[in-house]
Image (spheres, rainbow, N blue to C red):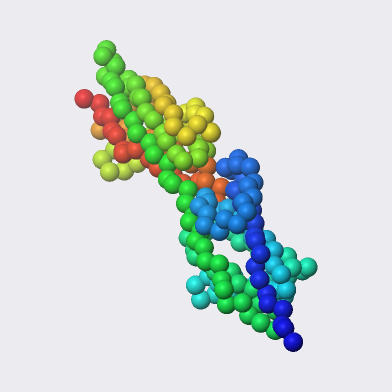
Amino acid sequence: RVLPKPNLLHFSVTLDYPAYLHKITETMDNNGNITVPQGTHITWKFHTANADEVQITTGTQQIRIPCNNNLCSYGVQARNDFSYQASSSNSYLNNRDSLQYFVSVIPDAFPEIHVERSQDSLYFDRFYFKGGIRDDYGFRKLQFVSFVMKDKDTVRPATATPIPFQPDATAQPFYFYFDAQTLSLSLGESLHYYFEVWDNDGVNGSKRSRTGEMTFKLP
């Protein structure tokens, strides 16, 4: 009697990207080596012959996926790089021939921000700022943060002023004007301020980057 040998005939991989990336779901055939943004949901569909299940092995973990009419499906959310092997079996035989692949996962990077300061030529307490922000996918918030200190104590709490920006533009300039005279600083008080930006990371939560802290004090 000849026992039926299980085989993996072909497979497809469907990539369902995180919603905040606004990318259309993709399906690829017989392509197991893939690079995806972190948080992508990956679904494999294995088409088999004479197989009761498909085994997915990642490191020391083995997942057994039952087949229905020679079709086996498995899904996972990609958080980190991983390699995997796929093989098939039935109640008679294990097919030791396996497919080996690697999934490379690209984390959402931190946003970048830089700024240049110019002082008004007539009024020493008025400042103009020109800056830029950059991110791999986009932004959630951009603001100017300031607070007043005297000696080493904060005497006025921090205030945040929103700065207009384009959420989906991955690299863009920004401009800001600030008149320190509006604070009516007293002698011995100093203004401390910086700019900060949040990205739109929908997997790990928004990440913040900020410029170095700058100061202004009455002469």
Please tell me which residue lies in front, 70 or 183.
Answer: 70
Residue at the spot 31% in from the left edge and 27% down from the top edge: 116
Residue at the spot 58% in from the left edge and 53% down from the top edge: 40
Q: Residue furthest bottom?
A: 1
What percent of the width, then of the height, locates residue 114?
34, 34
Q: Does any portion of residue 189 appear in the rendered image? A: no
Against 92, residue 52 (above or below) is: above
Please tell me which residue lies in front, 143 or 10.
Answer: 10
Screen quadrant of the C terminus = top left
What percent of the width, then of the height, locates residue 92?
70, 84
Q: Does any portion of residue 22 appear in the rendered image? A: yes
Q: Residue furthest top?
A: 122
Q: Is residue 40 left or right of residue 80?
A: right
Please tell me which residue lies in front, 4 or 127.
Answer: 4
Against 156, residue 45 (above or below) is: below
What percent of the width, then of the height, locates residue 181?
35, 21
Residue at the spot 47% in from the left edge and 48% down from the top edge: 108
Q: Is residue 47 left or right of residue 107?
A: right
Q: Is residue 35 left or right of residue 213?
A: right
Q: How many discs appear? A: 0
User: Within the image, what quadrant is residue 150 found in?
Assistant: top left
Screen quadrant of the N terminus = bottom right
What percent of the width, then of the height, locates residue 48?
69, 67
Residue at the spot 26% in from the left edge and 29% down from the top edge: 217
